[in-house]
Image (spheres, rainbow, N blue to C red):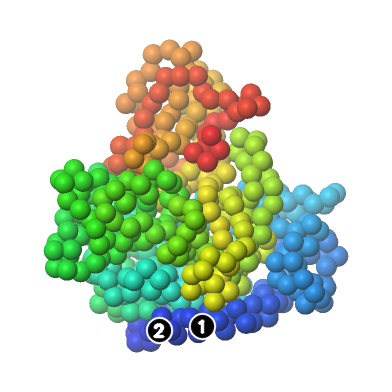
């Protein structure tokens, strides 16, 4: 913590321009293969405890072999070959929830085994984005600085480098990293609205301390409480900025942006001139249409807590959620694997090229799948070499509501043991469905079989949320429970739990696989 405080003044003094950001990216693209090999040599072969070192040894692959593969086939070609030889980790293995079985050998990895051994943390925070089960993350100023060029180019592409920047997010220590990376290219927020804060007193105190240090060093705004079910104050503030002939940018989740758009429309006000910079959950067509019907723009990025930003959308996408991959920072390939309901999906495997990344990733799943293609779209990012595109990005083992995510498997005991014990029924009588309404607002439904009999639905919801708060003792889940209660997005439906095409009934079903 002391190192973090000491490093803040120097961090804020040094900023980059969009041109400098582009130059940084070009240099990164030029030495992409070198960056990959340096990370493998230092963080994998140079770390006896690395899970990837064990997998490479099992595959009979040494550093010299990887160097030859990169020279002959490039980074992605080398990664494809390594994947065929069993060098990858599934989402469950990366989280330490399942052993890694390769042939006749079984490996047991822990979440912390994937920590980057060469990165010193300035402070820690709990993940609350798309990585599933919350993870205690080590956050460094170096990693924030390494992500800044990508966000600078994203802001520049959409003409919001000089726009008033507003955040509407949950309150937690990890938000400091997002504000830090924006400040690195001169974008200091003018307002920070916070949806909720959860967790233990210790967690909240930690978040307050980190936030206070960043605010004081960077002259950033104090967080202002703004509950999810009260979006009008944010919409009203944006309208005041529009009346002053400014064009504000808002960083929030897609569903939160929908709430702001609907609040403005309910009062017959236009948000033309507002740009929503979106992340943390899928930008579906319904969400995009609702946001744009208010006059605002909806522009997504894609990333995850352990690795930061993976990609962002240019001004000329083909698909609603399409993003260019930041290829100087990540390599992405894909493979087929079963989703939570048994159906096959095209899951992304990510390899990080950033030296300051919190987790070492070498063909690692992060729980997401979708389309992956290489093409030129005609935008300025083509000239940087960012020609890999992802779209229709969804999660196969995670549920995300209001920008906070959790692993569906963590709900098994709650749905299969706790609820049947308190309200009757047995395994298979309760199921959690992820849905969205016609406007794109998220909704979660506890489906209760009619065979259970009479159920106090209000009590059922409360028991569910209270157990969610205590799930595994993570403040992340307490934050999510508070946000779900605040937004009123948890419902109860009396119906037979839905079965897959194979006739199986799973405790949860995500929006993506139904």
Residue located at (46% from left, 81% from top): 21
Q: Earlier in the sequence, mark 1 or mark 2?
A: 2
Q: Residues within 10 Å of mark 1 (few under 14, many from 20)?
A: some
Tell me which corner region of the image, top left, top right, bottom left or bottom right, holds residue 243.
bottom left
Q: Is residue 399 left or right of residue 99?
A: left
Residue in the picture at 54% in, 77% down: 383
Tell me: residue 311, above or below residue 505.
Answer: below
Does dot 1 land on a helix, a strand or a loop?
Answer: helix
Q: Does 3 sit above or below residue 339?
A: below
Q: Which is more toward the observer, 95 or 112?
A: 95
Q: CA distance from mark 1 to mark 2?
A: 10 Å
- For the residues bearing labels 1 and 2, Cβ distance under 8 angstroms: yes
Instruction: Name the one closer to the observer, 229 or 451.
Output: 229
Q: Element under label 2?
A: loop
Residue 435 position in % (x across, y down): 43, 36
Where 363 falls versus 460 (above or below)?
Answer: below
Q: Position of residue 301 (x, y in %)?
A: 45, 61
Which residue in the structure is indicated by mark 2?
Answer: 16
- Residue 264 placed where, x, y %? 20, 49
Q: Nearer the viewer, residue 332 or 8?
A: 332
Tag 1 residue: 24
Picture residue at 20% right of the left edge, 60% below the top? 238
Instruction: Residue 439 in the image: state x and y as whole percent.
Output: 34, 40
Q: Residue 71 vs residue 246: left or right? A: right
């Amino acid at each position: 913590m002391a190192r973090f405080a000491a490093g803040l003044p120097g961090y804020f003094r040094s900023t980059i321009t969009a041109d400098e950001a582009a130059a940084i990216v070009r240099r990164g693209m030029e030495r992409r293969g070198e960056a990959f090999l340096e990370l493998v040599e230092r963080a994998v072969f140079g770390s006896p405890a690395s899970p990837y070192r064990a997998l490479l040894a099992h595959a009979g692959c040494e550093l010299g072999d990887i160097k030859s593969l990169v020279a002959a086939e490039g980074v992605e070609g080398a990664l494809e070959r390594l994947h065929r030889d069993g060098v990858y980790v599934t989402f469950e293995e990366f989280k330490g929830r399942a052993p890694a079985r390769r042939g006749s050998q079984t490996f047991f990895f822990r979440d912390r085994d994937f920590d980057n051994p060469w990165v010193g943390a300035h402070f820690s925070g709990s993940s609350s984005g798309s990585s599933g089960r919350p993870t205690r993350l080590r956050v460094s100023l170096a990693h924030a600085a390494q992500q800044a060029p990508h966000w600078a180019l994203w802001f520049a592409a959409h003409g919001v480098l000089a726009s008033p920047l507003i955040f509407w997010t949950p309150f937690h220590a990890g938000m400091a990293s997002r504000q830090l990376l924006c400040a690195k290219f001169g974008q200091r927020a003018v307002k920070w609205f916070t949806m909720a804060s959860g967790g233990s007193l210790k967690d909240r105190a930690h978040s307050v301390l980190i936030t206070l240090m960043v605010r004081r060093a960077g002259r950033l705004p104090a967080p202002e409480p703004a509950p999810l079910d009260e979006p009008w104050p944010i919409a009203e503030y944006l309208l005041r900025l529009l009346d002053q002939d400014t064009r504000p940018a808002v960083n929030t989740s897609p569903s939160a942006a929908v709430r702001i758009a609907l609040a403005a429309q309910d009062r017959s006000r236009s948000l033309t001139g507002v740009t929503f910079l979106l992340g943390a959950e899928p930008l579906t067509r319904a969400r995009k249409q609702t946001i744009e019907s208010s006059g605002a723009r909806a522009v997504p990025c894609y990333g995850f807590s352990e690795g930061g930003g993976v990609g962002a959308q240019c001004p000329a996408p083909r698909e609603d959620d399409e993003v260019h991959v930041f290829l100087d920072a990540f390599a992405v390939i894909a493979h087929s694997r079963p989703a939570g309901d048994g159906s096959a999906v095209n899951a992304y495997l990510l390899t990080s090229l950033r030296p300051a990344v919190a987790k070492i990733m070498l063909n690692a799943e992060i729980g997401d799948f979708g389309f992956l293609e290489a093409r030129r779209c005609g935008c300025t990012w083509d000239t940087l070499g960012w020609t890999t595109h992802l779209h229709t990005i969804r999660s196969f083992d995670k549920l995300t509501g209001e920008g906070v995510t959790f692993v569906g498997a963590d709900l098994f005991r709650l749905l299969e043991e706790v609820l049947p014990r308190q309200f009757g029924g047995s395994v298979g009588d309760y199921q959690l469905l992820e849905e969205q309404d016609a406007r794109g607002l998220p909704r979660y439904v506890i489906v209760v079989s009619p065979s259970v009999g009479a159920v106090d639905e209000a009590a059922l919801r409360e028991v569910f949320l209270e157990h969610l708060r205590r799930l595994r003792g993570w403040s992340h889940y307490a934050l999510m429970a508070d946000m779900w209660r605040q937004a009123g997005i948890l419902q109860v439906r009396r119906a037979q739990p839905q079965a897959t095409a194979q006739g199986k009934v799973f405790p949860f079903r995500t929006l993506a696989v139904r």
